[in-house]
Amino acid sequence: MSDPAPTDRTRVRRVPGKAAYDRATIDAILDAGLVAHVGVTGDGGQPFVVPCAYARVGDEVLLHGSVASRLVRMAAAGSPVCVTVTHLDGLVAARSLFESSMHYRSVMLLGAARQLDDPAEVLAALLALSDRLIPGRVTEARGPSDVELRQTKVVALTIDEASAKVSSGWPDDPPEDVTLPVWAGVIPLEQHWGAPVAAPDLPAGVEVSPSIRSLADDDRLVRPQRPGT
């Protein structure tokens, strides 16, 4: 694992003090997320951005979809890909609208993806994706059949052109606004999984499986410490 050097395309120019290019920061943000927004440019220059489940495995981010998916087909064919992951951690309410902002952690990856062709590699990738969404579920649910594997395409994007951006801290009000009678501070955004809701056709007596119960302690949803703590 090596830190990707910022390129002309990934170097953060707007508020560069919020930028990070080290793999530890990039991997932590990727590993805390479940949904990426993946962008490609289609025929005629029309951009398409699609939300996708993803998983980071080592130096690559795995994406999958139907063999008929335009996004996955274009990525597999070598079209340039942009993958972004963002966590909203809170709102920053300043004394002015101009200075109000957000707490967030984000990553942007650029490059060309490779298609996974080896059936064993495809299966391993799909299991990694499933385990990323619900850790431990792959040992409880039925695995993909040969037909389902043939209907699925998996691509991998190497983390070698990437940047992160992290915004935190208190409102940055100018001195002349500090005395205004307007509340200022941070409103943290907390996330948690709700109680499982059984499918209406679930046979009587089938208990909630361990992987589902374990989501109550899923530390991926824990946000960084708020400022001042």
Image (cartoon, rainbow, N blue to C red):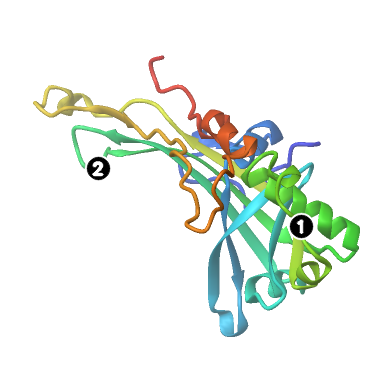
Label 2 vs 1, first from the N-terminus: 2
x and y percentages locating residue 88 in the rendered image: 43, 41
> In which quadrant of the rendered image does the N terminus lie?
top right
**Residue at point 61% right, 69% down?**
40
Residue 73 to residue 166: above or below = below
Which residue sits furthest bottom? Answer: 44
Mark 1, secondary structure of its residue: strand
Pick the residue in front: 110 or 35. Answer: 35
x and y percentages locating residue 61 in the rendered image: 72, 51
**Residue at point 82% right, 57% down?**
123
Which residue sits furthest left? Answer: 181
Residue 7 seen in the figure: no
Please name the residue that numbered disc 1 is placed on: 156
What amino acid is labelled 2 in the image? Phe
Would you say 69 lies left or right of 201 here? right
**Residue at point 87% right, 56% down?**
121
What amino acid is labelled 1 in the image? Ala
The local crowd at label 1, few if under 14, some if 14 to 19, many if 20 or more residues have their Cα within 10 Å, is: many
In which quarter of the view is residue 69 placed? bottom right
Pick the residue in front: 13 or 212. Answer: 212
**Residue at point 72% right, 59% down?**
111
x and y percentages locating residue 16 in the rendered image: 51, 38
Please name the residue that numbered disc 2 is placed on: 98
Mark 2, secondary structure of its residue: loop
Residue 143 to residue 226: above or below = below
Residue 74 seen in the figure: yes
Residue 102 to residue 69: above or below = above
Pick the residue in front: 151 or 228. Answer: 151
**Whole-number angstrom distance, CA of label 2 to CA of label 1:** 40 Å
